[in-house]
Image (spheres, helix red, strand yellow):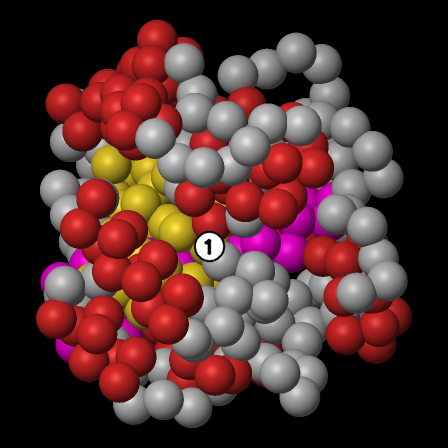
């Protein structure tokens, strides 16, 4: 497990039980197991992905917190109603106008983690269509104010944000973390590296499957296994960020068939941190051409 204080390496989500991209038989052994408990034997952090679709029940979150060891940190993805209103309306048929009740319900879902000191950060992930304009800047300012009690990390994907030096100044003014991402590069993509804007660093690695990025589904889009050379490259970015911040989070989101935990273990080793390797990790077939 990554054991250096202040450096947390893990995956985006831990439960992928169905579909072609399942982790069963690739990361998790067969049969019924406590997946989160098993996961936490190897990693010291994880992103809660389900909170993007709806605020999780606080009692369920409390149980998650009790199933991981001391020192383990969760980060939680902000509810899509705040960041992807169109997607929310399409999925639910409900208007996406934000109310104070929405804020209160989401914050309540995080209380068990806050109370036990296990909430590392709150991640607001925006789509590539979210651009740097008056509306976009107002949304960022509102989020920074609304969720100021947490370490807030913001993932921006459109190049209009990195093309504008004022973006870093706006985020730094509210101690909001600008998430560094690795993903396929297109004409509209954000810069590969963005400034550090707070006392924490937050990096997310989505894979580089350009062929299926727009055409693939929620599984095949992430069918990309980083090569050893690419892991070395990303590890240097993590190491550099960790030297300049108090906390550093690095998450692999290339979740197809356990690729994410495999690459996370590789990064832990590349950074010369204490590591345990799950038995099934070594059984994953190497994809052709790094994908």
Residue 274 visible within the image: no
Q: Please tell me which residue lies in front, 114 or 269.
A: 114
Residue 125, given in percent of the width and then of the height, sits at 46, 54
> In the shown orientation, is residue 244 left or right of residue 91?
left
> In the shown orientation, is residue 225 left or right of residue 205?
right
Is residue 249 located in the magenta-colored stretch of the structure? yes
Residue 132, given in percent of the width and then of the height, sits at 43, 76
Task: Bin the neighbour count of mark 1 within 10 Å (Cα to Cα): few under 14, some 14-19, many 20 and up.
Answer: many
> In the shown orientation, is residue 271 left or right of residue 221?
left
Q: Name the residue beneath numbered marker 1.
A: 125
Q: Quadrant of the C terminus?
A: bottom right
> In the shown orientation, is residue 53 left or right of residue 210?
left
Residue 31, given in percent of the width and then of the height, sits at 71, 14
Residue 168, given in percent of the width and then of the height, sits at 26, 80
Above or below, comparing residue 111 to residue 47 in the picture = above
Above or below, comparing residue 252 to residue 240 in the picture = above
Give the quarter of the image for residue 263: bottom right
| Callout 1 secondary element | strand
Q: Please tell me which residue lies in front, 20 or 277.
A: 20
Give the quarter of the image for residue 136: bottom left
Give the quarter of the image for residue 110: top left
Residue at 70% across, 37% down: 90
Residue 19 visible within the image: yes
Q: Please tell me which residue lies in front, 261 or 46.
A: 46
Residue at 62% across, 46% down: 86
Q: Please tell me which residue lies in front, 256 or 55.
A: 55
Is residue 92 located in the magenta-colored stretch of the structure? no
Residue at 55% across, 23% down: 35
Above or below, comparing residue 170 to residue 259 in the picture = below
Q: Which residues are magenta?
A: 239-258
């Amino acid at each position: 497990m990554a054991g250096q204080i202040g450096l947390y390496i893990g995956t985006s989500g831990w439960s992928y039980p169905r579909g072609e991209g399942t982790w069963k038989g690739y990361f998790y052994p067969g049969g019924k197991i406590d997946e989160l408990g098993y996961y936490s034997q190897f990693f010291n952090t994880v992103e809660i992905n389900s909170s993007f679709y709806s605020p999780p029940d606080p009692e369920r979150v409390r149980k998650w917190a009790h199933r991981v060891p001391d020192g383990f940190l969760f980060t939680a993805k902000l509810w899509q109603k705040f960041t992807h209103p169109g997607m929310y309306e399409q999925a639910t048929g409900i208007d996406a106008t934000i109310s104070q009740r929405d804020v209160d319900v989401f914050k309540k879902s995080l209380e068990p983690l806050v109370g036990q000191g296990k909430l590392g950060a709150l991640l607001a992930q925006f789509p590539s269509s979210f651009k740097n304009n008056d509306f976009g800047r107002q949304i960022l300012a509102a989020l920074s104010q609304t969720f100021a009690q947490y370490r807030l990390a913001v993932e921006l994907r459109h190049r209009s944000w990195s093309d504008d030096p004022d973006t870093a100044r706006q985020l730094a003014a509210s101690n909001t973390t600008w998430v560094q991402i690795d993903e396929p590069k297109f004409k509209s993509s954000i810069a590969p590296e963005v400034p550090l804007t707070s006392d924490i660093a937050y990096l997310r690695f989505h894979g580089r499957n350009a062929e299926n990025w727009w055409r693939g589904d929620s599984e095949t889009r992430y069918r990309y296994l980083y090569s050893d050379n690419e892991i070395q490259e990303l590890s240097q970015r993590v190491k550099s960020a960790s030297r300049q911040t108090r906390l550093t989070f690095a998450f692999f989101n290339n979740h197809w068939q356990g690729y994410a935990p495999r690459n996370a273990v590789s990064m832990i080793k590349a950074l010369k941190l204490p590591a345990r390797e799950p038995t099934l990790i070594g059984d994953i077939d190497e994809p052709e051409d790094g994908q």
